[in-house]
Image (cartoon, rainbow, N blue to C red):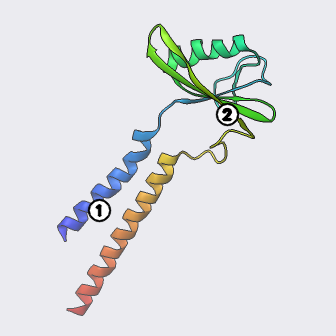
Amino acid sequence: MKKYRIIAVLAIMIALLIPGAVNAAGTFYCSTSVAVGGTGTLTDPWACSDAAQLQSVVDDQICDVYSGGDLYQIFPASYRYHVITWYSVDDCRITASYDYAGYPPSTGVEIGTPYIVGGVALLGAGLVAAGLLIRRKRATAAV
């Protein structure tokens, strides 16, 4: 019975560590309808209304600060997905661009996948622990 308790405690600890370990930066947004500023998030995108602003975002923000990532350039009725790859200090550039209609993916509810996976794992660990407690009570009552 002690093995089951140790396994349950370890499962809960692992479930709590998943969100902190997986959350990382790398997806950024810029908008052609924003004139200046921004932080690169969906709610506050960088300004990239022309080619010079887009290149500034790539060079000064994504390459220098984050060493590459994914950039969604949002237009009024579509978006362009840019893959920005960092090869070295002097070589960081857009390696691929794709045009799509509509709005960028994963722009709905702002709950990260690691938190969803961690919550499901925690719920599963709780159900296993509850099952072990019920089984133990039934085994004790039967004796």
Residue underneath mark 2 = 42
Residue 8 disc label: 1
Tell me the SS state at disc 1: helix
- Label 1 or label 2, whichever lies nearer to me, is 2
**Residue 19 falls left or right of residue 52:** left
Tally the marks. 2
For residue 5, which quarter of the picture?
Answer: bottom left
Residue found at the far bottom of this picture = 142
Q: Position of residue 72 (x, y in %)?
A: 65, 30
Q: Position of residue 75 (x, y in %)?
A: 77, 30
Which quadrant is the N terminus positioned in? bottom left
Amino acid type, callout 1: Ala
For residue 40, which quarter of the picture?
Answer: top right
Residue found at the far top of this picture = 90
For residue 87, which quarter of the picture?
Answer: top left
**Residue at figure coordinates x 75%, y 40% from the top left:** 102
Q: Residues within 10 Å of mark 1 (few under 14, many from 20)?
A: some
Does 132 sit above or below residue 35?
A: below
Which of the pair 99/46 is nearer the observer? 99
**Residue at figure coordinates x 47%, y 46% from the top left:** 114
Q: Position of residue 69 (x, y in %)?
A: 53, 26
Does 142 sit above or below residue 62?
A: below
Amino acid type, callout 2: Leu
Q: Position of residue 117 (x, y in %)?
A: 46, 53
Q: Residues within 10 Å of mark 2 (few under 14, many from 20)?
A: some
The CA span between labels 1 and 2 is 38 Å
